[in-house]
Amino acid sequence: EISGVRTMAADLRLAVGMLSLAAAAGLTVPATHMGAISFQNALVTRASAPAMSASWKPARRDALWAAAASVLLAASPVRAEEVTTSSGLKYSVVKSGNGGQPAVGDLIAIRFKGKVAATGAVFDDILESPEPYYTRVGSGNVLAGVEEAVKLMHSGDTWDLTIPGDLAFGSKGRSASPGKPRIPPGAVIDFRLELVAVPGKDDDIIEQNGIID
């Protein structure tokens, strides 16, 4: 019986600990959930083990865990809102920066990872590369969907893009090549894009990298 009491007390303290941490983090904890804390304090401090056992019912345990779980779910990151442009490009903001915003003709530094939405096959990935990819906006060196997105971004931004086929590899797709998968005609592309810098509009970046335009 003592072992059962210890199990109940540990079960309660763990669940209540989650509720308390959520409250300390500034999350809103409903009064009904906070009542579980008072219930726990009254229960585990009772001197009589039989009294504790008599007071404990599985339904109370389940209710307490449900309360704790609901608070933790409320703490889960909120999925970024997805925006669809007039061209059909979709994007959601993963991280916001406050640097320069590029225009056509500007030199930009980007990192990215692209994959075929239908299969998950990755065709390019330099997200972890120490050296970003440099290109000029409007040069046609990157996908049309990427060209559109970067003109809306600020340096320091990271966006997730869903690029429709006509803004990606078009009706022809792309043949497989060593280390790169075949991209079917009209394939929708999932693309994570980081705008690392806009040299000329980010003075500190120019100084750090010695970029001369």
Image: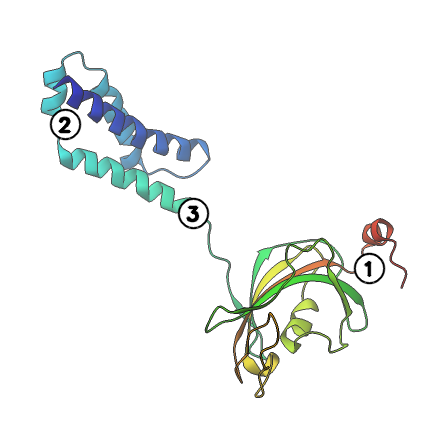
Which residue bears the numbered disc 3? Answer: 76
In the image: residue 39, left or right of residue 80: left
Q: Amino acid at mark 2?
A: Trp
Which residue bears the numbered disc 2? Answer: 56
Q: Quadrant of residue 21?
A: top left
* Residue count near mark 3 (Cα–Cα under 10 Å), binned few <14, some 14–19, many ≥20: few
Foreground: disc 1 or disc 2: 1
Which residue bears the numbered disc 1? Answer: 199
Q: Quadrant of residue 106?
A: bottom right
Q: Amino acid at mark 3?
A: Ser
Residue 107: image location, x then y, percent: 80, 66
Label 2's element? loop
Q: Earlier in the sequence, mark 1 or mark 2?
A: 2
Location of the N terminus (image quadrant): top left
Q: Amino acid at mark 1?
A: Pro
Q: Residue furthest front?
A: 178
In the image: residue 116, left or right of residue 155: left
Q: Earlier in the sequence, mark 3 or mark 2?
A: 2
User: What residue is shown at x 85% (from left), y 54% (from top)?
Assistant: 206
